[in-house]
Image (cartoon, rainbow, N blue to C red):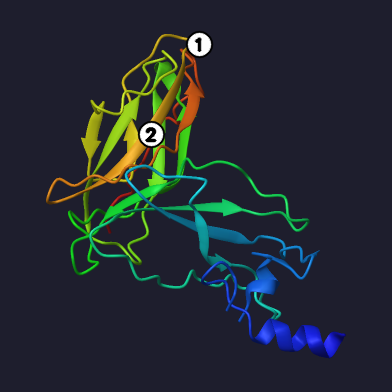
Amino acid sequence: MPELLTTFNARWDPLHRGRTPAGIATGTLMTAGGGYPARAGVHLLYMSVGEAPSEADAWVVGACSPTADPANEIKNFPTYPLPPSSVCWFWVRAVSPGGAEESSRVNAIRIKTDSNGDPVDPAPNRPTHLTATAIAGGRIRLTWQYDPVGEQAPVSQFSIYHDNGGGVIDLNTPLDTTSARVYVTDAYAHGTTVKFTVRSRSSGGVEETNRVNVSATADAEGPPDLPAPTLTMGAVV
């Protein structure tokens, strides 16, 4: 049995619904009536084709998981050719070691292709590691990161959206834009919980469409700002 499993692992791949060299290791498919649980930390890449993302028509086109080496590195997702003249949606989901998969599709990315399968109106990657922190005076500080690997177009600026405490983020009218990766808002009323989404925009004006959001509650007091240090200049000899 171990020999058969080793051979199966070597010939399975996460592409095409898992039927092709590492799929069993990432648990992307039920096989011969038996489920093989994914390794800890596995993520599955889903794809669907159509004007809107569809759970019914989605399939796994890639997976990444810890490798077998001692460094426990994470494999990158494989590249995947896009169908021509289509609207493609991709989203990533985490799977537990026992095979339980999250249901969120909040990070879905839309890509429209031309007759050659190349992206139309290429967009930058979405920001990652978005955080919101209440600071002094009812203000909120947002921070995020940007990874250019695999981007369709370089990022030019970031659009900041908020719900202004109302519960629904207005994704049509940005609160502000910035080329930095940190942003400090104006003051909100004390105790107001505000949600934020940050989107990347290319120099051509194409904005990616992530809906990832974070929130923070404004605090009129907030953590105190650090005072500026007092410097004493010594005599110049």
Can the viewer see residue 86 in this picture?
yes
Question: Which labelled disc corresponds to residue 41?
Answer: none
Of the 4 image quadrants, the one containing the N terminus is: bottom right
Vertical comparison of 132 with 189: above or below: below
Out of 11 and 69, give the one closest to the viewer.
11
Out of 63 and 212, give the one closest to the viewer.
63
Q: Secondary structure at mark 1?
A: loop
Vertical comparison of 220 with 148: above or below: above
Q: Secondary structure at mark 2?
A: strand
Q: Position of residue 196 (x, y in %)?
A: 40, 29
Residue sitting at 48 percent across and 27 percent down? Answer: 215
Q: Earlier in the sequence, mark 2 or mark 1?
A: 1
Can the viewer see residue 229 in this picture?
no
The residue type indicated by label 2 comes to Thr
Name the residue beneath numbered marker 2.
197
Mark 1 is surrounded, within 10 Å at the Cα level, by few (under 14), some (14 to 19) or many (20 or more) other residues, namely few
Marks 2 & 1, CB-CB < 8 Å contact: no
Residue sitting at 36 percent across and 54 percent down? Answer: 146
Q: Position of residue 202 (x, y in %)?
A: 19, 51
Q: CA distance from mark 2 to mark 1?
A: 20 Å
Q: Position of residue 119 (x, y in %)?
A: 23, 61
Name the residue beneath numbered marker 1.
191
Q: Position of residue 147 (x, y in %)?
A: 37, 59
Of the 4 image quadrants, the one containing the C terminus is: bottom left
| Mark 2 vs mark 1: in front | 2
The residue type indicated by label 1 comes to Gly
Vertical comparison of 182 with 118: above or below: above
Quarter where residue 63 is shown: bottom right
Q: Is residue 131 left or right of residue 113?
A: right
Mark 2 is surrounded, within 10 Å at the Cα level, by few (under 14), some (14 to 19) or many (20 or more) other residues, namely many
Q: Is residue 36 left or right of residue 200?
A: right
